Image (cartoon, grey):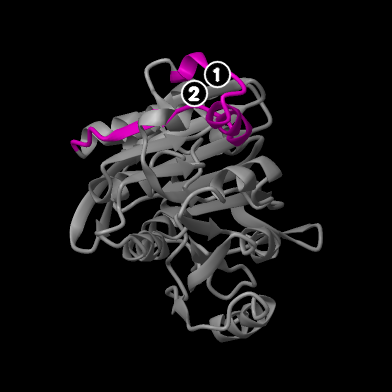
């Protein structure tokens, strides 16, 4: 589906809530995906090929033009270097790339310890971050953390994460999304920020200089570890990352429960002017909506227009939509990412 079609469909979806101008950010049509996952097709000559599922069948493919260039270029090189032992019982290959790094994960239906030396050799020969997985086992060669560098309004922001983290799948659009969020914050309004679903700090780190203090929450322990590391990488001291679910955070603000994870944080000292939420596809639950609609400014990043609309219908009882944006995260697909900025009525 072309971006223009998506714009028309989604403008109609939100027409009852917003009739102003919607900013639209188009993606490159190819070489944009940072993550690519393939099945493996074994032909009658025991040669392996990348494959994708179509109508419940594996269809061999020669190339995948949606993937970032570094992935496209490395795909044939990897196949050429996978020997017979490594090909046996191999059922999947996953790639994850950044501007600075590439990692490859090989998925097996056999004990990967039996091919340890072959895996080690290919990781050394190709000089790659290699992860091998089979049921209950995982072996890592050359590390699994990836470095990323984003250009946000001419400023370099540095990150580190691994493939267990949620990662924005389109680096170009991710930079545009962060810049758009920054554009929603007026200098005379900024005080403190509350961010929910912060991940490894994708938005948080870039927003740090725009607020006095930031309280950012995330349920994943691994994401919190990387978020703290990313503060160090960027010399940031004004962010408090806390491992709390959205429900727990609501309980903490309502003083319904005390949390040991908040023992060094006094919620009453925060003067929150903005809330940023980037929830999963299911959108916001009732507790989160009750919590965030008390604050003056809400910035909502959504990967699901349907649940976004449902949430906005509730939030618009207390807030007014000021700005709206569409981001073409997955070019030539029906998927659309949205950004909404609301202020209290």
Q: Which residues are magenta?
A: 235-262
**Disc 2: which residue:** 139
Which mark lies nearer to you, 2 or 1?
2
Which of the numbered marks, if any, corresponds to residue 113? 1
Quadrant housing residue 68: bottom left
Q: Measure how far apart labels 2 and 1 are at the Cα level.
A: 8 Å
The spot of residue 220 in percent (x, y) is 53, 30
The spot of residue 53 in percent (x, y) is 72, 58
Residue 151 visible? The answer is yes
Quadrant housing residue 137: top right
Q: Nearer the viewer, residue 121 or 264?
A: 264
Residue 63 visible? The answer is no
Q: Nearer the viewer, residue 127 or 233?
A: 233
- Please state if 153 lies on the left or on the right of 160 as rendered: left
**Residue in the image at 61% along x and 79% along y:** 6
The spot of residue 320 in percent (x, y) is 54, 68
**Residue in the image at 43% along x and 42% along y:** 194
Q: Nearer the viewer, residue 51 or 256?
A: 256
């Amino acid at each position: 589906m072309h971006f223009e079609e998506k714009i028309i469909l989604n403008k109609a979806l939100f027409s009852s809530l917003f009739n102003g101008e919607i900013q639209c950010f188009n993606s490159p049509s190819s070489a944009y995906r940072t993550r690519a996952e393939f099945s493996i097709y074994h032909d009658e000559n025991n040669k392996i090929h990348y494959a994708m599922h179509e109508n419940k069948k594996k269809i061999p493919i020669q190339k995948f033009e949606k993937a970032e260039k570094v992935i496209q270029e490395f795909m044939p090189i990897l196949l050429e270097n996978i020997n017979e032992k490594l090909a046996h019982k191999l059922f999947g290959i996953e790639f994850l790339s950044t501007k600075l790094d590439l990692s490859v994960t090989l998925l097996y239906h056999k004990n990967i310890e039996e091919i340890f030396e072959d895996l080690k050799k290919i990781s050394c020969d190709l000089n790659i971050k290699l992860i091998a997985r089979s049921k209950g086992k995982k072996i890592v060669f050359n590390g699994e953390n990836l470095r990323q560098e984003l250009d946000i309004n001419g400023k370099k922001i540095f990150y580190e994460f691994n493939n267990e983290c949620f990662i924005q799948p389109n680096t170009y659009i991710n930079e545009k999304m962060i810049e758009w969020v920054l554009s929603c914050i007026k200098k005379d309004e900024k005080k403190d920020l509350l961010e929910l679903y912060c991940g490894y700090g994708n938005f948080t780190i870039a927003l740090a200089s725009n607020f006095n203090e930031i309280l950012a929450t995330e349920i994943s322990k691994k994401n919190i570890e990387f978020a703290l590391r990313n503060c160090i990488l960027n010399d940031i001291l004004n962010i408090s990352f806390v491992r709390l679910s959205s429900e727990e955070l609501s309980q903490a603000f309502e003083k319904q429960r005390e949390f040991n994870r908040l023992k060094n944080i006094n919620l009453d000292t925060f003067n929150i002017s903005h809330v940023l939420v980037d929830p999963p596809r299911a959108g916001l639950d009732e507790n989160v909506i009750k919590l965030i609609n008390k604050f003056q400014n809400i910035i909502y990043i959504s990967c699901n227009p349907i649940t976004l609309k449902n949430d906005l219908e509730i939030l618009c009882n207390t807030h007014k939509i000021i700005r709206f944006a569409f981001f073409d995260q997955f070019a030539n697909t029906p998927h659309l990412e949205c950004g909404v900025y609301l202020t209290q009525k």
